[in-house]
Every structure is written in structure tokens, then in C-alpha cells.
Amino acid sequence: MKKIEDLNVDVDTIGASGKEEDLYIEPEVFEMGLGDEDVHITRPLHIHYKITRNNENMHAIIHICGQIDTYCSRCLSPMVYPVDLTLDTQYVPAEDGMPDDLEAEREDQHLGYYRKTLMLGEYIISEIIVSLPIYYVCDSRCKGLCPICGVNLNKGPCICKRPVDPKFDILKQLKIHG
């Protein structure tokens, strides 16, 4: 498999007892689909899927487990973001006249369409992208960087002098005389 989008399951291979498989997707195969230069996958992602069949309707449960190496948005330190996602979706036969890109026709994560194959890879990459945070934070208590000198405030205070807003001078006087 050269890219995650290549993960497809031929419907004819899904028998009455269903189909179940464990896969390990190599980092370079998966990382291409993410399209983010600050997000790296250094170890294979584990994907377990089970597909059951009810006549022409397919039910897929997919579990994705792994980790993403990235940087904290506050302090810029390297960090690991865990990926542990369970997807549950139904696939129904595509209607006549639907475009070739059936995954684009998906209106929610719980209902997809197929012709001869289930395009699991496209579904998986789109759901992982949607599940990732906009900002990665190493710790909820992360203090970030000093906006003036750039010191990582998690490692200690900075020594730069911050300009004081003159509106707060009266409060400083109260503290000194109070």
C-alpha cells in the first residue's frame, strides 16, 4: 500500500460471517494523507476493522491506535499526541448517478456508499483529520513562551521587564501604601 487511501475492501470478499483484519500502516503511508508538515508519525498505526454484512448493507467498525509526534502550540516543545479512535459506519449501495468520489457524498460519519469496494482508507483519513485538535497542547497547565523574550515559562520565569499599562499605576500605588 503506497498511501492510506489505497485501503479498500472488495465487497465480494465479505461473506456471511463478515471480514475482520488487523493492519499496521507504515508511517510514510499514513503521513502523506495528513498533509501537515508539523505532524509526524514515527511508528506504524494499528488498524483493526470488522465488517459485517446484512444483504447489500455493510456495517464497519474500525479501531485506529497509534501516536502522532508534533509540537505544543504554546511552548513549541516536542510532544506526542495519542490516537485512539473507534469509527462505526454503515455502507449502502451507491445510487445511479452518484459521482465516482463516493466518499465526498458522505453527509455524516455514520453512512457511506459503495459500488464494488468499501473505501475504508479515505474514510479513515478523513475521520482522523476531523478528530485531531486545531492546536496541540503538551499539558493543560502549559504556560507557553514569554511573548517578549521567548523563554519557555514551564522551565522557569523570564527576566525581561514587561511594560506596565499606565492604567494600572493606581493599583500599584494602592499596593505600596496599603
Image (cartoon, rainbow, N blue to C red):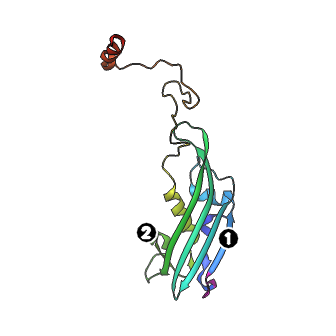
On the question of residue 44 being in view, the answer is yes
How far across and down, in percent of the image, does residue 21 sit?
66, 74
N-terminal label among 2 and 1: 1
Say which residue appears at 69% left-offset and 59% top-offset: 44
Q: Quadrant of residue 45?
A: bottom right
Q: Secondary structure at mark 2?
A: loop
**Residue in view at x 51 percent, y 38 percent:** 141
Q: Majority secondary structure of the magenta segment?
A: loop
Magenta range:
13-18
The residue at 68%/52% (across/down) is 42
| In the depicted structure, whether residue 41 falls above or below residue 161 | below
Check residue 74 in the rendering and tell me which mark sits there, or answer none: none
Q: Position of residue 46 (x, y in %)?
A: 66, 63
**The magenta stretch spans residue 148:** no
Give me the disc on residue 22.
1
Tell whether label 1 touches label 2 (CB within 8 Å): no
Say if the magenta span includes residue 16.
yes
**Tag 1: Cα neighbours inside 10 Å, few (<14), some, or many (≥20)?**
few
- Quadrant where the N terminus sits is bottom right
Q: Classify residue 173 as left or right of residue 8.
A: left
Percent coordinates x, y for residue 51 in the rendering: 58, 78
Q: State which quarter of the image contains the C terminus.
A: top left
Which circle marks residue 108 in the picture? Answer: 2
What secondary structure is found at the residue carrying circle 1? strand
Decide if residue 7 is in sight here: no
Q: Residues within 10 Å of mark 2 (few under 14, many from 20)?
A: few
**Residue type, label 2:** Asp
Going 51% across and 19% down the picture, which residue do you hit? Answer: 160
Up/down of 164 relative to 116, above or below: above
As rendered, which of 170 and 44 lies closer to the eye?
170
Spot the residue most to the front: 178
What percent of the width, then of the height, locates residue 83?
58, 57
